[in-house]
């Protein structure tokens, strides 16, 4: 991070002198002032926290240590030094704060002053953080209610150059159900917003993209742990709790001092926006550091009177003996309206489908330019990642689609594979600093809503024998044959299957050992399933076999174990006689 800032101030021997002068001027004209009139002079040395300040507290960073803007304040301070309670009416756009944004900071200061007066929160600190985090809500691009439009989202915190923070909000705030992203003008990560979110504008919602809600949440967060922000050490701890970087602390401190010396209100949407996000520690600097963040409006290149400025040398005169190469003619650069700025979810709903079926929902994204307007002709690459066997129409795992004139690009249909489970679809657009969106998707097992026995013949076996007739069932879904449905067969004591049975009928496993539950059964293409042979132990009685399917359908079948009935032997006549001879003779009854 520090190296990244220094690269902006040190570009060759000539620029080194300019940078040194700039830093000296900055230190002389913009040293941090007292937090309040009765606070310590100068607000304390920002370096007082030392290199160990970043670990001074146990609470996590509100932003997840996501990237922030590294632009420093202009060297020319506002016209009115000292406290800025009486704001100048005019001045440069850089010194101005959009009206709704400024109102939100002041309202937050007043609210916190009422509920936590010992904190002594100055609105200029909120302004400094808001400037560094989002350029004052992208120059004040908020609607009448103070809500950023379009929403402000940081990059996915996927561990690739940033912290690794897996999704905590189901994508509710950041439209990302795989990883968290910093959200809104004050760049809260969803897990922090869940604890600190506020409803400051009284609309019944705690919205991190609303500047009033976000400013009050930031104020309360900075005041946590009984901090007194009029004390330099507490102020430093508060800022570091927001983003654990000493470079971040110094940048916020510079803007804090700048706004304390004076600022003024400007119309919403007219503020300037810094264009160089920070490089997270340990990552490779972007090859195109001037590319604006999501929804950002690029500002002009640094001029020589600002930190990071570099004077452009004039062309050498012909024949003056100079060996310096002649300057190249200026090349045209894309305008903000032509510059790719952000990639957003274009209303994609939940991605769920049954194995082998086509997803009803299609993945759609929206590309915006650097001014926040829809941008057409942007190439978006969609990729399926996972082991469910899911593919795009045509059997492809990766497809590329260009955005339409309205900025939207829709991926082809997804066809679910045969394996149930979760997978992701990733959309990537842009070069240099590509924007990425990740969508979570689920394949569920094939289902049946009905399963019934095929046949009505009683199933009976003798003790120690086996059932002569096989058990056959058919599964259906919405009255159609349900193929490939997983079925579980269990010997139970009750129709609901609450108690398994350890006596009576049983199956055999591959080793020939008795088992009373089978979980590897699947219906065929016609929805039919023929169970393996069923054997009987020596315990007579009537038993229950319960079969259940994915989807909750079930059927209970009776199995009976009983010994065959004994039959009485028939009487036979002696050899050499006829039936008539052996039949009893009638006796005559003598007459009375």
Image (spheres, grey):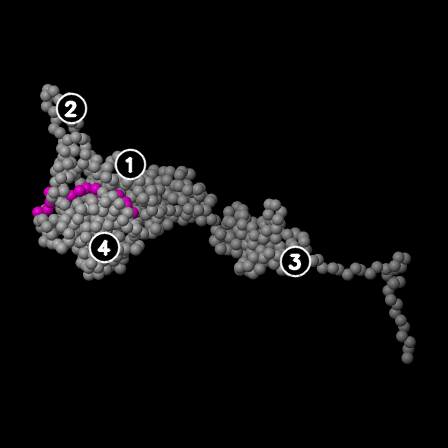
Nearer-N-terminus badge (1/4): 4
Magenta residues, start to end: 64-79
Q: Quadrant of residue 398?
A: top left
Percent coordinates x, y for residue 251 in the rendering: 20, 44
Point out which mark residue 227 bears. Answer: 4
Q: Are marks 1 and 4 in contact (CB under 8 Å)?
A: no
Q: Is residue 139 visible?
A: no
Residue named by callout 2 = 324
Q: Find out whether residue 303 is within the magenta segment.
A: no
Q: Is residue 405 above or below residue 326?
A: below
Task: Name which residue lies at 35% across and 48% down.
Answer: 167
Mark 1 → mark 2, Cα distance in angstroms: 31 Å
Real-space Cα separation, disc 3 to disc 1, in angstroms: 74 Å
Residue 71 belongs to magenta span? yes
Q: Quadrant of the N terminus?
A: top left
Q: SS class of the residue under badge 2?
A: loop
Residue occupying the point 21% across, 37% down? 6
Give the SS element for disc 1. Answer: loop
Q: Earlier in the sequence, mark 1 or mark 2?
A: 1
Q: Which residue is mark 3?
A: 539
Label 1 environment density (alpha carbons within 10 Å; few <14, some 14–19, many ≥20): few
**Alpha carbon separation for disc pair 2 and 4:** 57 Å
Are the two marked residues, 1 and 2, in contact with CB atoms closer than 8 angstroms?
Answer: no
Above or below, 292 against 199 in this view is: above
Reading the image, the residue beneath label 1 is: 284
Q: CA distance from mark 3 to mark 2?
A: 104 Å
Are the two marked residues, 3 and 1, in contact with CB atoms closer than 8 angstroms? no
Q: Earlier in the sequence, mark 3 or mark 1?
A: 1
Q: On the rendered structure, is 518 left or right of 348?
A: right
């Amino acid at each position: 991070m520090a190296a990244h800032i220094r690269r902006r101030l040190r570009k060759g021997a000539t620029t080194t002198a300019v940078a040194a002068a700039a830093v000296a001027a900055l230190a002389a004209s913009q040293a941090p002032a007292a937090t309040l009139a009765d606070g310590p002079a100068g607000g304390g040395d920002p370096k007082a926290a030392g290199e160990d300040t970043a670990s001074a507290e146990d609470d996590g960073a509100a932003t997840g240590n996501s990237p922030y803007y590294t632009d420093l304040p202009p060297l020319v301070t506002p016209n009115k030094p000292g406290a800025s309670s009486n704001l100048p009416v005019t001045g440069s756009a850089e010194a101005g704060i959009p009206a709704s944004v400024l109102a939100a900071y002041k309202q937050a200061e007043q609210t916190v002053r009422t509920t936590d007066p010992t904190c002594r929160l100055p609105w200029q600190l909120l302004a400094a953080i808001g400037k560094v985090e989002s350029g004052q809500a992208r120059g004040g691009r908020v609607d009448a209610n103070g809500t950023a439009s379009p929403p402000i989202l940081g990059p996915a915190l996927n561990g690739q150059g940033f912290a690794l923070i897996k999704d905590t909000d189901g994508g509710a705030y950041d439209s990302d159900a795989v990883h968290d992203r910093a959200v809104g003008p004050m760049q809260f990560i969803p897990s922090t917003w869940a604890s600190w979110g506020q409803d400051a504008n009284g609309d019944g919602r705690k919205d991190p993209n609303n500047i009033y809600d976000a400013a009050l949440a930031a104020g309360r967060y900075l005041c946590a742990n009984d901090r007194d922000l009029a004390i330099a050490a507490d102020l430093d701890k508060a800022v570091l709790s927001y983003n654990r970087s000493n470079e971040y602390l110094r940048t916020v401190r510079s803007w804090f001092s700048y706004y304390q010396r004076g600022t003024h209100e400007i119309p919403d949407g007219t503020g300037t926006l810094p264009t160089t996000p920070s490089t997270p520690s340990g990552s490779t600097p972007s090859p195109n550091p001037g590319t604006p963040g999501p929804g950002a409006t690029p500002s002009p290149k640094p001029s020589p009177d600002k930190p990071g400025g570099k004077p452009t040398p004039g062309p050498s005169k012909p024949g003056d003996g100079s060996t310096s190469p002649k300057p190249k003619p200026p090349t045209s650069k894309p305008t903000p309206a032509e510059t790719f700025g952000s990639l957003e979810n274009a209303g994609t709903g939940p991605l769920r489908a049954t194995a082998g079926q086509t997803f009803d929902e299609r993945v759609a994204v929206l590309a915006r330019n650097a001014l926040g307007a829809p941008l057409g002709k942007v190439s978006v690459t969609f990729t399926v990642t996972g082991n469910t066997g899911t593919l795009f129409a045509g059997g492809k795992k990766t497809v590329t689609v260009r955005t339409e004139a309205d900025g939207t690009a829709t991926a082809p249909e997804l066809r679910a594979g045969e394996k149930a489970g979760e997978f992701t679809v990733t959309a990537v657009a842009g070069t240099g600093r590509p924007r990425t969106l990740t969508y979570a998707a689920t394949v569920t097992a094939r289902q049946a809503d009905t399963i019934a026995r095929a046949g009505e013949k009683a199933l009976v076996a003798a003790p120690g024998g086996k059932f002569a007739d096989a058990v056959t069932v058919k599964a259906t879904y919405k009255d159609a044959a349900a193929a490939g449905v997983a079925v579980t067969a269990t010997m139970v004591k009750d129709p609901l299957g609450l108690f398994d049975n350890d006596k009576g009928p049983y199956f055999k496993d591959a080793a020939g050992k008795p088992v009373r539950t089978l979980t590897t059964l699947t219906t065929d293409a016609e929805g039919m399933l023929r169970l393996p042979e069923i054997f009987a132990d020596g315990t007579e009685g009537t038993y229950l076999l319960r079969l259940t399917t994915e989807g909750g359908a079930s059927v209970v079948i009776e199995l009976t174990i009983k010994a065959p009935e004994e039959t009485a032997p028939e009487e036979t006549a002696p050899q050499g006689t006829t039936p008539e001879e052996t039949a009893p003779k009638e006796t005559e009854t003598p007459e009375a």
